[in-house]
Image: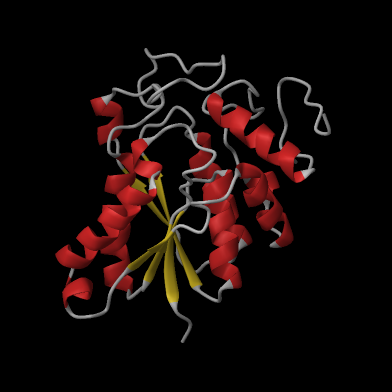
Amino acid sequence: MAKKAVVVLSGGLDSTTCMGIANREGYALYPLTFSYGQRHQREVEQAKKIAAYYGVSEHRIVDLDFFKQLGGSALTDKSIEVPDDGEEKGIPVTYVPARNMIFLSLASAYAEVIGAETIFTGVSSVDYSGYPDCRPEFIASMSETINLATKSGVTDHHLTIKTPLMHLTKGETVRLGTELGVPYQLTTSCYNGEEEACGTCDSCRLRIKGFKEAGQIDPISYRIPIDWFN
């Protein structure tokens, strides 16, 4: 029987690259997608397509409308505008309070129930938006916590959180994903959630930078012209 992995799958570039990595490593894939009232809700639909592409037996979509009720982030509160003038200093308004902590907590519960030994998540501490829950310190702390707080952890069936992109630039991530045949044409990154990516939000800027560094043309559409080789 194949070993199992829960993949926190947003429908974006990084999490889909993690799907490709977990697939290459021989895991049976159990993607977990969160619908949390994000303005870029389109990513949930793309996650469904990505899960189908990999032929998974089960794809769970978790409704976390609490985040929308909570607000406090440009991604969940439409009264807060998504910046389009480059990366912000400090923690940006697109940070969603405690998002990755909650996602990984739920992923660990799911992993326990299905007997998975590994959780994959696409966080990176290199090319990222300044979110505190994308740092190695957080992942190390969370790994310790879930093994203290779960039946799996206290019975020596430890859960491992794998972050294969943690120390990769976006360019390195795109190169790796391209080698693995990751279906980037199915992914979405734009915070505005339209069919055509805006090309100006922080997430789009990081994605464009990654494809340029990798010497690749991004297969998704943008509202603005992009010179991929300049």
How many callouts does the rendering have?
A: 0
Is residue 106 something one can see in this rendering? Answer: no
> Does residue 110 sit above or below 121 in this rendering?
below
For the question of whether residue 188 can be seen, the reply is yes
* Residue 103 left/right relative to 226: left
Relative to 125, say whether 31 is above or below.
below
Q: Is residue 93 above or below residue 189?
A: above
Q: For this view, does 32 lie left or right of residue 180?
A: left
Residue 208 placed where, x, y %?
Answer: 68, 33
Q: Nearer the viewer, residue 127 or 64?
A: 127
Q: Residue at x 52, y 42 (%)?
A: 126
Which image quadrant: the C terminus? top right
Q: Is residue 137 left or right of residue 177?
A: left
Colour logic: secondary structure
Residue found at x 47% / y 20%:
88
Toward the bottom, the furthest residue is 1
- The residue nearer to you, when weighing 78 against 92, is 92
What residue do we see at 28% from left, 46% from top? 101
Identify which residue is drawn at 45% across, 27% down.
39
229 vs 75, left or right, is right
Residue 64 position (above or below residue 142): above
Q: In the image, residue 9 lies at what x, y percent?
A: 47, 52
Q: Position of residue 31 (x, y in %)?
A: 45, 59
**Image x and y of residue 181, in percent:** 71, 60
> 124 or 151: nearer the eye?
124
| 54 or 155, nearer to the observer | 155
